[in-house]
Image (tube, grey):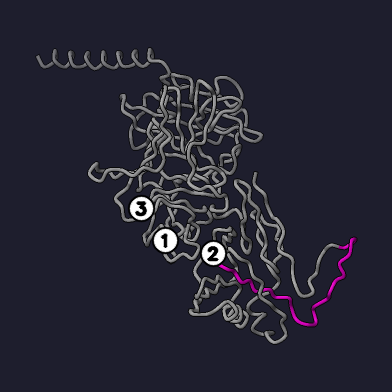
């Protein structure tokens, strides 16, 4: 009797496995182990059932990269990247869904990289590119890995970002608070009140990050980052270095202290923050929902290469893309466009970076400025230096002053900076004189800013001054008593 029951059970298992395989083979767009994509020939991609999204190889620079894109005309929109910081691969590279259920990138030199790591989940038996733009791996019909868990610079309708998986920093009036913030895989990467009262934090940067792209054609990790923080705040930062600096933050939802833990974009184009529990409700960030046929609209929220977080709608029937909402309207509200000792001045989406008076442009990736002067030189030669203070209205910059002197008028504030070697610049707002050391960081000039800046200009010792005649054939001005305001260092279109 026991032998008969064992045979019946074995037959049931075999039949079930057979039925499951038949069902998967008959289901459209199911990808089975053994399937291969080729960078240099067809098939290059696996489409979603509707054909709106594809996963596979796309052109980048002189080679190829692996990712997911939304089809459109005249060009596709990349929404996810695999191994985004690796260099492009050659036309002989392949993407293999191996017999063991691993998604593997193989290059011509024999190198291989695992795109989807499912080692802790056991064997994977199928995959699929879904119509939501999510690429998933299945084990017995259960999802064991999905690209939605590892966003790069974009979240799509139906996708979440959770606070225990995002990177973060601060915003203009202390958006971050004191905490050790983890950088995990669900974060958008690609301010501080420019006098950041939060102090500095050692913010942890783990390996799974979401950052803006370098450019619209280069999807490697870029300069900016957006994070859903554990304190309930959604914050944008400059993605500067291994250690995040609270002074690098430039925007937030100002919701620190609220129980928000999830940023969600639903399929109707509504971007909200909510808690893990329905008890606390939700907070609207942006509403892109429209009337009409929602099935023909795809929404995405992207941290663009210029650091602006935007909500877009893709009208599939009309083949149009609309920018519905963005977190900042002024390009100079994004930190990081201009380098040290320079400031940003804008008109709409166009901005220029200017050296402070007395500073010269350096040949750096991000335009920065410097002057041939050090504090040590000042201390040892103070009596011989020729210096003066120049004034710029409607200015601000980031960081904490090393000294704040109260109840001073403008002239007293200027004199205080002149007398201190450490002082490189001052932000004056009646009646406070905020004194800063060089370098000055994230400067911004705008008519709505009511602060006056005083910049110390060091000319040199009296023996070093060599007045230069200015005439039509020689416009390289070497100052006599004054300096012209710096030159435009960059212009973004």
Circle 2: element type: loop
Say whether marks 2 and 3 touch (CB < 8 Å).
Answer: no
**Residue located beneath label 3 in the image:** 255
| Quadrant containing the N terminus in the rendered view | top left
Say whether marks 3 and 1 touch (CB < 8 Å).
Answer: no
Counting from the top left corner in percent of width and height, residue 350 is at 63, 47
**Residue located beneath label 2 in the image:** 450
211 vs 146, left or right, is right
Counting from the top left corner in percent of width and height, residue 248 is at 50, 58
The alpha-carbon separation of the residues under discs 2 and 1 comes to 20 Å
Q: Residues within 10 Å of mark 2 (few under 14, many from 20)?
A: some
Q: Quadrant of residue 364?
A: bottom right
Q: Mark 3 or 1 closer to N-term? A: 1
Q: Residue at x 67, y 59 (%)?
A: 354
116 vs 380, left or right, is left
The alpha-carbon separation of the residues under discs 2 and 3 comes to 26 Å
Counting from the top left corner in percent of width and height, residue 123 is at 35, 29
Most distant residue in the bottom direction: 383
**Residue located beneath label 1 in the image:** 174
């Amino acid at each position: 009797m026991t032998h008969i029951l064992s045979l019946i059970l074995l037959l049931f298992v075999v039949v079930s496995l057979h039925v499951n395989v038949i069902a998967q083979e008959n289901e459209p767009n199911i990808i089975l182990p053994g399937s291969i994509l080729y960078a240099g020939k067809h098939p290059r991609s696996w489409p979603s059932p509707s054909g709106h999204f594809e996963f596979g190889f796309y052109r980048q620079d002189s080679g190829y990269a692996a990712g997911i894109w939304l089809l459109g005309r005249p060009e596709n929109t990349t929404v996810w990247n695999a191994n985004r910081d690796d260099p492009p691969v050659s036309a002989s590279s392949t993407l293999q869904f191996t017999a063991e259920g691993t998604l593997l990138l193989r290059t011509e030199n024999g190198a291989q990289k695992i795109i989807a790591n499912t080692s802790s989940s056991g064997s994977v038996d199928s995959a699929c590119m879904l119509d939501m733009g999510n690429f998933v791996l299945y084990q017995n019909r259960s999802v064991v890995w999905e690209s939605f868990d590892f966003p790069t610079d974009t979240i799509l309708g139906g996708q979440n970002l959770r606070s225990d998986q995002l990177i973060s920093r601060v915003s203009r009036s202390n958006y971050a608070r004191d905490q050790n913030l983890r950088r995990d895989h669900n974060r958008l990467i690609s301010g501080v009140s420019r006098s950041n009262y939060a102090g500095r934090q050692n913010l942890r940067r783990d390996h799974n990050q979401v950052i803006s792209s370098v450019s619209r054609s280069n999807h490697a990790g870029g300069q900016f980052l957006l994070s859903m923080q554990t304190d309930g705040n959604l914050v944008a930062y400059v993605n500067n270095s291994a250690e995040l600096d609270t002074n690098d933050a430039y925007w937030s939802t100002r919701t620190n202290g609220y129980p928000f833990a999830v940023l969600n974009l639903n399929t109707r184009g509504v971007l909200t923050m909510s808690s893990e529990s329905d008890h606390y409700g939700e907070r609207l960030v942006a509403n892109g929902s429209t009337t009409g046929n929602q099935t023909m609209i795809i929404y995405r929220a992207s941290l663009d290469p210029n650091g602006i977080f935007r909500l877009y709608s893709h009208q599939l029937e009309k083949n149009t893309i609309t920018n519905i909402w963005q977190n900042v309207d002024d390009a100079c509200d994004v930190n990081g466009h201009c380098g040290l000792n320079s400031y940003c001045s804008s008109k709409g989406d166009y901005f220029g970076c200017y050296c402070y008076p007395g500073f010269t442009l350096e040949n750096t990736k991000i335009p920065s400025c410097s002057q041939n002067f050090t504090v040590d030189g000042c201390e040892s030669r103070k009596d011989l230096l020729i210096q003066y203070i120049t004034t710029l209205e409607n200015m601000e910059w980031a960081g904490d002053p090393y000294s704040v002197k109260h109840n001073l008028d403008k002239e007293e504030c200027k004199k205080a900076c002149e007398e201190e070697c450490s002082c490189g610049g001052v932000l004056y707002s009646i009646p406070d004189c905020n004194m800063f050391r060089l370098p000055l960081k994230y400067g911004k000039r705008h008519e709505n800013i009511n602060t006056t800046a005083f910049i110390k200009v060091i000319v040199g010792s009296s023996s070093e001054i060599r007045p230069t005649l200015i005439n039509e054939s020689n416009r390289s001005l070497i100052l006599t008593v004054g300096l012209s305001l710096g030159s435009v260092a960059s212009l973004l279109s």
